[in-house]
């Protein structure tokens, strides 16, 4: 990766936008596969019933997603878990620039490489706490 490469030509390298694009590319297959699996396991009559009752195609798809919402939420949680734990994409595309593109995971990697293990561990605990809180919140949503 360099300023002469594909991202450098567009001015995206070492920017938050590049990190977002990279994380999106990373998470999309995971979310898509879990969502497809959830929808494939749904009752096939949901779509036809909604269409028969006069729903538009978009409304019928929405109804199908609502019926499979727990699987869709699980897909989103899996994608979130993958993205929140990612170091490589954030480091390569963001550059770990303090105050601009540094993330929790890249900060943990940096502090560990500097030998600041206590600080790296503290950051890891914070990161795990954030992930736990998000999962608990989504679990509460599923129980409603």
Image (spheres, rainbow, N blue to C red):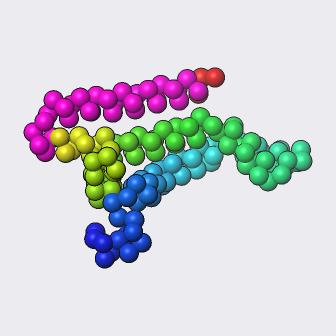
Q: In the displayed structure, would residue 3 be above or below residue 17?
A: below
Residue drawn at point x = 40 percent, y = 54 percent: 16
Q: Where residue 41 appears, x then y in whole percent?
A: 62, 43
Q: Is residue 26 visible?
A: no
Decide if residue 41 is on the left or right side of residue 87.
right
Q: Where residue 63 appears, x then y in whole percent?
A: 74, 42
Q: Where residue 54 appears, x then y in whole percent?
A: 89, 47
* Magenta-colored segment: predominant secondary structure: helix
Residue drawn at point x = 36 percent, y = 27 percent: 129
Residue 143: quarter of image: top right
Say if the magenta span includes residue 94.
no
**Numbered label tally:** 0
Question: In the rendered structure, which segment of residues is drawn in magenta?
Answer: 112-141
Q: Where residue 114 appears, x then y in whole percent?
A: 11, 43
Say if the magenta span includes residue 139.
yes
The N terminus is located in which quarter? Answer: bottom left
Decide if residue 23 is on the left or right side of residue 46.
left
Q: In the displayed structure, would residue 126 be above or below residue 32?
A: above
Q: Is residue 36 visible?
A: yes
Which of the pair 22/64 is nearer the observer?
Answer: 22
Residue drawn at point x = 83 percent, y = 44 percent: 49
Please identify the residue farthest to the front as the structure is shown: 99
Which of the pair 30/80 is nearer the observer?
Answer: 80
Which of the pair 113/44 is nearer the observer?
Answer: 113
Decide if residue 50 is on the left or right side of residue 124.
right
Residue drawn at point x = 85 percent, y = 47 percent: 55
Please identify the residue farthest to the left as the structure is shown: 115
Which of the pair 49/113 is nearer the observer?
Answer: 113
The C terminus is located in which quarter? Answer: top right
């Amino acid at each position: 990766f360099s300023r002469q490469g594909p991202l450098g030509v567009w001015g995206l390298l070492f920017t938050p936008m590049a990190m977002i694009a990279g994380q999106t590319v990373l998470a999309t297959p995971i979310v898509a596969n879990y969502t497809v699996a959830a929808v494939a396991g749904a009752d096939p009559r949901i779509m036809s019933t909604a269409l028969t009752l006069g729903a538009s195609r978009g409304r019928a798809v929405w109804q199908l997603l609502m019926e499979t919402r727990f699987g869709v939420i699980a897909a989103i949680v899996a994608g979130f878990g993958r993205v929140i734990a990612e170091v490589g994409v954030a480091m390569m595309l963001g550059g770990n620039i303090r105050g601009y593109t540094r993330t929790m995971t890249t900060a943990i990697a940096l502090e560990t490489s500097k030998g600041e293990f206590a600080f790296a561990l503290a950051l890891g605990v914070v990161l795990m706490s954030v992930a736990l809180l998000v999962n608990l919140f989504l679990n509460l949503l599923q129980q409603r």
